Image (spheres, helix red, strand yellow):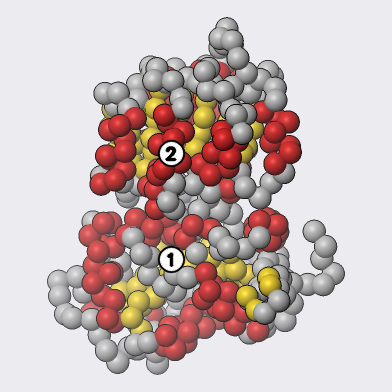
Amino acid sequence: MTFSDLGIAPTILRALQAAGYENPTAVQAEAVPAAIAGRDLLVSAQTGSGKTAAFLLPALTKLSERSTAKGQGPRVLVLTPTRELAQQVEKNALEYGKDLRWMRTACLVGGSSFGYQIRALSRPIDLIVATPGRLMDHMRSGRIDFSRLEMLVLDEADRMLDMGFIDDIEAIVKATPETRQTVLFSATLDGIVGRMAEKMTRDPQRIEIARTETSGGTIEEHLLYADDLNHKHRLLDYILKESGFDQCVIFSATKAYSEELADKLSDQGYSAACLHGDMPQSWRNRTLNDLRRGRIKVLVATDVAARGIDVPTITHVVNFDLPKQAEDYVHRIGRTGRAGRDGTAITLAESKEFHKVRRIEQYLKRQITEGVIDGLEPTRRPPKGPRRNNNGKGGYGDRRHGSGNGRGGYGNNRREGGYQGQRREGGYQGNRGPRSSAQ
């Protein structure tokens, strides 16, 4: 099957072909024709499965036909949980819709010029990509007219609910025409997501893509148990020295510890930075830009802040802390193995957290290879059970794994890139980055 079999408008199809896209992923093959036919959709698909194109291609096909409806409000509205993801969606829309010369888009997110957004909304608009909070700001000011809205997309609906946006989402949906088409993407369609979806869709088609699908390279996964926090630090030190990584994302459970860990790694000589939701938007932008340019080699991030990061040169992901929700594991490791490249994901867990590991494995419907590192073996092991493999040996723990050359920047005393600040008396202290940089 090729994209030409999906009913996509010729102008959009030409842009896809020019960009080198030929064959749709599984979620695109199922969702695109159904959405073009006008069906409401509930789609469960993992990060990296091509879900953004799965809703943008039908939306742009709709926009390829000029509207005769009066008004200047959007015909398509896409809601995303984070600023970075919204910007990426708008970028993809402009790429796929580059031949729609009349198409006007607006990205309504926090941390960018409110005045610029007001000016964008003062003229006819075709596509709005927004975070719920910033969209509500404009709605309260009476700047949004949804009378022309034909299609509403909720991308990563589960994450938006986790971030407390349910009231905003319900208010936004209530303000849109009942005749609209609704397309919802989520890691899970159960629980609160399912209940919300029932209220906003009409006879939706459910599409669930197996979590094992991948549109990128192979991700090699490993699990290492530790006795305590100090032991985890020693394991992390070994991984960074011996893995031969190009760029690495380390996940921390809290904002405060992401700062502390990034500072420690910077003091050890790594080009390290942290990324979390409480950072000023200007620092988040700078950090992401430095990561894309390769100036940052090690990024310590929280789950929400790292959503939407798409940097093909990220070769390793380390779960320093286990994710709070099993589905977040999939989103985390999806930061590597992109653009057809292989990646490595290493999870550190204290022995007392074995039940959390089991929940992740139950969600994945497979086991994560458990290993040990010679000289860094845990003194306490999780309860023995049927999940154990390799007799607790092998996997990442084999000292022959990796090149051992520390290509990730070990020994480099330049503290490049990103925010490294702590909250101290006197307010926000900002970045401990290179003083020669003024971006």
Q: Say what secondary structure mark 2 lies in.
A: helix
Residue 416: x and y in percent read 72, 71
Residue 146: x and y in percent read 52, 23
79 relative position to 227: left or right = right
Residue 250: x and y in percent read 51, 69
Q: Quadrant of residue 169?
A: top left
Q: Nearer the observer, disc 1 or disc 2?
A: 2
Q: Quadrant of the N terminus?
A: top left
Q: Amino acid at mark 1?
A: Ala
Label placed on residue 345: 1
| Crowd band around label 1 with a 10 angstrom C-alpha radius: few (<14), some (14–19), many (20+) | many
Kindly indicate whether the residue at mark 2 contacts the one at mark 1 (C-beta within 8 angstroms).
no
Please say if 357 is above or below 113.
below
Outermost residue to the top: 68
Q: Quadrant of the C terminus?
A: bottom right
Please say if 62 is above or below 211.
above
**Which residue bears the numbered disc 2?**
169
- Closest to the observer: 399 or 8? 8
Please tell me how many numbered marks the rendered image carries: 2
